[in-house]
Image (spheres, rainbow, N blue to C red):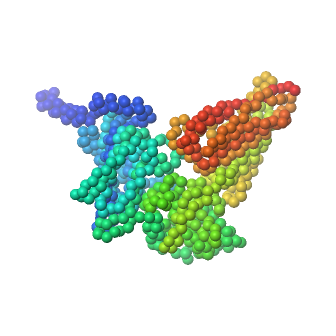
Amino acid sequence: MNKKTTLIVFLLYHLVLFPQKNIDPTSEDIQLAKELKKKYLEDDVAILNHVEDISFDFDKKTEQVIVKHNNNQEYINLDSRTKIPLYLFYDEQSTIDRLKVSYRNNKNAGIYFGDEYYNNEELFHTDARVKWTTLKFPLLGYKYNFSYTKTYSDIKYFVNTYFDDTYPILKKTIKVHIPDWLSLDIKEINFDNASITKDSKRDDENGITTYIYTLENSNAIPKEDNKPGPTYYRPHLLFLAKSHQKTGEKKTLLNNTGDLYNWYYSLIQQLKDDPETIKEKTLSIIKDSQTEEDKIKAIYYWVQDNIRYIAFEDGIAGFKPDEAQNVYRKKYGDCKGMANLTKQMLKIAGFDARLTWIGTKRIAYDYSLPTIAVDNHMICTVINGDKKYYLDSTEKYNPLNYSAERIQNKQVLIEDGDSYILDKIPLYESTQNLETFVGDFIIEKEELIGKISREYKGESKSHFLYSINNLKTDKREQILEWYIKRDDNNLSIANIDVTDIKDRDGDLSLKYNINQKNAVSAFEDELYIDIDYYKEYKNLNLDKRSIDYMFPYKIFEKTAINLEIPTDYKIKELPKDLKIKNDDFEIIFSYKTDGKKIKYEKTIHFKNAKISANAIDAWKGFHYNLKKQYQKQIILTKGK
């Protein structure tokens, strides 16, 4: 190697080495990462500092208040090697720019972001887009800075911002700069269990008041399934833009519920529905109906059966429904389009049908808050004399006069011309979802042989019908057998008899014969019997849970199993009864005998469709006993 070559190699080595030294973690970074890992055992990355800076301006061309939402985040790796996704959503009402990922020395990391429409199998059209990338951390203590600005072209679409994140945060600061010409309320929600301080400062020269919120030492958002919506438990700020005077005169934005309704109503007034295109079909649907309720039911069920529901949940844009004729032609639509088709068909049939806005139980807000964040769903309401029918055509197997758990007891905003009607969806008792399991068993050759009768009501029936009818096969008996057996080869099923699996109105009944292996064990003169096959909620472990556990509906299950005691056997041991009862759940196990039969009864009742955070400790203690209960066996012994 000559001197010239040696010099080139030396220069290249140092050109690579010096920048690498500037981005590799320092000894202090490594030590900090180790300390944080001890505190956040389940997290691979933490946010050292996150600053949100929110400011407001006015677009003279559109005459809209615009929002600039600047974000700066500093990440640190808590593991030897980690990669995390970064993604930012935007739509026609927002843009994302000044997007940058840099090393700890603030040099641009050259990270490429993909930019595409947000799509999945259930999404047919939306203006939502996502910018995304993968951030790779090669070493413990490695740092990145991530910054971007999201701009909202209309302040009504800027509804809230959350303090916590997917990763633990050491410090987060949210600064909200409100100019004097803008009337904006800030609601502080779910602050009780968060270490958040608030300060303010005044800039008289520019006429701006700045509110500064600081959060310290926040855990990551719980990585748990079956969670309530984020507005119930995550600390956040809700922004209510009331009015502005930027142009010299007061311009109302969303000051009250009436303003929110007026904007919604202006959107549906833009619709160009063509009733003639769906009139013939509507009349054919109701031609055999004998009563007014029969007509409502016929139309409601037809939309449920024939229009495919495809939706993008929690989108803030796109509050305008599709025209009824478009939904009818395409045979699919979102909740707004399905509600509008239902409305137009019912109007053709002579009913007073109206579009209705509602927030599902995913949202904690109600219509006392004038913001588009209050709702995420649309249904149709029929007003017929003193009775209101709430029709959610997206609930494919719900009968007339019954609403799904997700909208029960929720406030609705019903169109009423230039005015509006506020009402509430009825709240249904858990007993209306009763699911029963009745079994009569005998013991033959160490097998349980019996006849089973199961019945489903309310949402237990709707969920059963959805599960069965959604499987893409015409082999109904095989589907039902799979549903019963859960792929367990110890079960043999025969003579399945089920009521009409398309019928929403009647109770659903399922009957079959069953042979169950490995449920009886013989040792010398004794039989050990495991009488409970399904062992519901045995695996519902909430030991690490801190927030409500949500069920899809209010659970009310009753099991009654009669076991015939074989000739020449008597009872040696029955498990003891078990019972727990509190505001959220009631579970009862009982064992009785008349000397000839053993009757095992079990009641499981989650009466509020959840185990609330303050009942989790009770569940933890009970769950231990529940697992032990399921392990207990009935013992029979030979002899008189």
- Looking at the picture, tell me which residue is in the foreground, 554 or 115: 554
> Which residue is found at the position 56% from the left and 44% from the top?
612
The residue closer to the viewer here, 493 or 431, is: 431
Residue found at x 19% / y 32%: 14
Is residue 280 placed above or below 531 in the rendered structure? below
Residue 400: image location, x then y, percent = 65, 62
Q: Give the residue drawn at x 70%, y 31%.
A: 632
In the picture, which quadrant includes the N terminus? Answer: top left
Please tell me which residue lies in front, 572 or 191. Answer: 191
Asked if residue 632 lies left or right of residue 412, the reply is right
Q: Residue 62: where, in percent of width, then height? A: 32, 67
Q: Residue furthest left?
A: 3
**Rendered view: 173 above or below 298:** above
* Image mark count: 0
Tell me the residue at 58%/35% (across/down). 620
Occupied quadrant, residue 591: top right
Q: Is residue 273 visible?
A: no
Q: Nearer the viewer, residue 450 or 362?
A: 362
Q: Quadrant of residue 635?
A: top right
Q: Position of residue 276 (x, y in %)?
A: 55, 77
